[in-house]
Image (cartoon, rainbow, N blue to C red):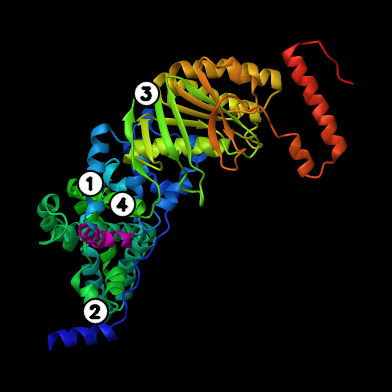
Amino acid sequence: MFDRLQHLWRSIAPAPSPLPRHFFTPHEVGQLHRIRGAAATCIDDQTWDDLLLPSYEDMLTMDASIFGRQMLHWRLRAGSSDEECAAQRARIALLLQDPARLGLLDAGLGTLRQADAEVAGLLFQGDAPPAPAWARWLWLLPLALLVSLAALVTQPLGWMLTLGTLAPLMALQIRYHRRIEAWDATLRSLHALLGATAALGKPGGPLLEPFADARARAERLHVRLAQPLYTRMIAGAKQYADWFAAANVARYFRTARIVAAERDLLRACYLACAGLEADVVLVRHLQAQGRWCWAERGAARELALENGVHPLMPQPAALSVSLLERGAFVSGQNASGKSTFLRMVGLNLIVARAFGFCYAEQARLPALPVRASMQNEDSLLGGESLYMAELRRARELLEAAQAAPGICLIDEVFRGTNHLESVSAAAAVLEELAARELVLVSSHNLVLAALLKEQLAPFFIDTTSGKPMLASGVLRNPNGIALLATQGFGERIENRAAEVARWLSGQLAAPHASSVG
């Protein structure tokens, strides 16, 4: 009979509404990283943008709460130590093998997605400002209002006393309105965090040891931070209490004191729940991937990727690369995929360092910070030309390499000046960088391959078979002039461009041996 009633109820009850997906700015998502990240080993802003990591992060964290997004962002930008990476790999492998546990975790963490404000800054940065001394006397205001109302009935000028009492009550609402609104959103996020902690630590829950002790404390704190019972039971009671008793102001200062006193518990809950959600997000992501592997950690100048792909590409071409001691100079025809190759390598390096896996069939990668220079541009407002932007970035890369060697990815080095000076400056800078760390550079300036052959092994992206592959050597058949015809420039321009190209090639091989008309 009971089973029939349950079935009937499920058939008529409304379906549960999906958990909301709140919008958070990049600044909010990066808050935990800014507080806890180590600057010397973190991914810098230009590398983050050059390697399209905002798009990758959005794909990865599409259904995550602000807690999981902040944790994943921190891991991506700061990386993980060998011990942290090994522990994370073990947790992910366990969840991949245990779908039931994964489902319980996912359900327990679902409360986190109700959070509509980030709280990492509150929990991990500085101390909460103390409440003003007058806050402890707020209870006198509603008492004074009652006295003034009695005077209003019995005294001819009692209305003046009532107005005098209402004035500070109204002033408090005006002054603290926005602050209390923001604090209410913070409390909702803290309630979501405490709710997830309680759900994960309940008997029969998916976690258990670290959450069993915290569960009871989290439930008590949840009650202490909640709205008073009468405001939830009586319609309109909250509004009257706020306007005529400053209840919201008093509650703001009271709950702020409680949160400050319980920050150790809240921090522990945050790190545990955010870490678990990050693991769940990674497991769900890997379940949807067609190509991935656990990455071995290699030496500082050792890099091997077998059939690596970029997860943002719908139909990626798999490319393999193997480097030991020397970096790589990559050439290729226009639109052959040189920039995509560098981004594929960079993303896999970062993901392997942060999460322990990468998008390849096999990989051995160094756990080092990655730095890129791929999208330097003129700055009209900043008054900085392309070449000056490139020089500034090159100086930043050299300084970073001195502080903490890593992996350097450079696309089309020094495009902003003439060919002769471009080659000269590029050779000098790349030699210095390659002496300090592993460097991968792509360029159309093929003469650089010969100048840097001691530091950078030459490769080119071969597209003759219709399927790109990385081959040893330097590109022999550039297609820049051939593309003139495909874009409608005409035979005359194409022939003249070819003539000038032959002359320039002759000048480089034997200066002054030929002349151009």
Query: Where is residue 119 drawn, in percent x and y?
Result: 31, 51
Type of amino acid under label 4 = Val
Type of amino acid under label 2 = Ile
Q: Residue at x 40, y 49 (%)?
A: 28
Q: CA distance from mark 4 to mark 1?
A: 9 Å
In the rendered structure, the answer to whether residue 438 lies left or right of residue 426 reads left
Magenta stretch? 100-115
Type of amino acid under label 1 = Arg
Farthest residue, direction right: 517
The residue beneath circle 2 is: 234
Farthest residue, direction front: 465
Q: Is residue 487 visible?
A: yes
- Locate residue 90: give its quadrant: top left
> Does label 4 or label 3 sit earlier along the sequence?
4
> Does label 2 or label 1 sit earlier along the sequence?
1
> Does label 4 or label 1 sit earlier along the sequence?
1
Q: Residues within 10 Å of mark 4 (few under 14, many from 20)?
A: some
Q: In terms of secondary structure, where does tag 2 sit?
A: loop
The residue beneath circle 4 is: 283
Q: Residues within 10 Å of mark 1 (few under 14, many from 20)?
A: some
Residue 101 among magenta residues: yes
Q: In terms of secondary structure, where does tag 1 sit?
A: helix
Q: Which mark is residue 91?
A: 1
Q: Is residue 466 above or below residue 103?
A: above
Query: Where is residue 505 drawn, in percent x and y?
Result: 75, 20
The residue beneath circle 3 is: 300
